[in-house]
Amino acid sequence: MSVQALASSPAQDAGTALTPSERDRYDANYIALFGDVSENAHRRWEVADRLGRADLVRLIEDLRIKAIHENSLGIKVQQLVQFGQLVALGKKPAAEHHAQAALKAGATVDELLGVVETAFITGGVPAYSLGIEIIAALEPVPAR
């Protein structure tokens, strides 16, 4: 089958909006990680539903479940890794979100610092500074 034929074959459920049980399942995975579901996630789902692309949401969310919740690293280590990657990329809001998820999963502030120190290797001083800024907001550093 040609690439064009593959690209033009619509998914069986392409136009079908997410069902309440699918939304509940996806919500549960965000709640397990972060304690809540971000407005951004719900917005993605609503726009995709409205534009007839709920099929893509299903693929993305099922991939997230597989990559995050069924990952051999476990949630804590996996969230520490994501925090470090996002710090190195300079993505502050997402890094903050994953720092909180790592703490929720049992990570310590010292482990977050270890990740930030490691992110310095790939992201330099900007990554290190961003990580320290995020940690400082979680754990105010006493004045000397």
Image (spheres, grey):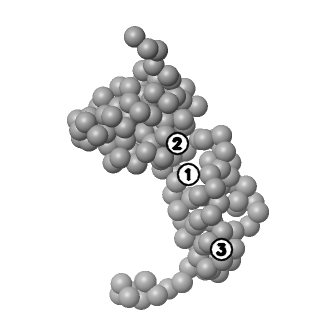
Q: Quadrant of residue 19?
A: bottom right
Q: Nearer the viewer, mark 1 or mark 2?
A: 2
Q: In 3D space, how far apart are the residues under numbered discs 3 and 1 (Cα atoms)?
A: 20 Å
Image location of residue 7, percent across then percent down: 43, 83
Q: Quadrant of residue 116?
A: top left
- Residue sticking out furthest to the top: 144
Residue drawn at point x = 47 percent, y = 47 percent? 94
102 or 18, which lies in front?
Answer: 102
Of mark 3 and mark 2, the one earlier in the sequence is 3
Of mark 3 and mark 1, the one earlier in the sequence is 3
- The residue identified by callout 1 is 65
Q: In 3D space, how far apart are the residues under numbered discs 3 and 2 (Cα atoms)?
A: 25 Å
Whether residue 72 is visible, yes or no, is: no
Label 3 CA crowd tier, 10 Å (few <14, some 14–19, many 20+):
some
From what the image shows, is residue 71 above or below residue 129? below
Residue drawn at point x = 50 percent, y = 85 percent? 9
Residues marked 1 and 2 touching at CB (< 8 Å): no
Task: Point out the image quarter for the N terminus.
Answer: bottom left
Of mark 1 and mark 2, the one earlier in the sequence is 1
- The residue identified by callout 2 is 97
Q: Nearer the viewer, mark 3 or mark 1?
A: 3
Q: Which mark is residue 49?
A: 3
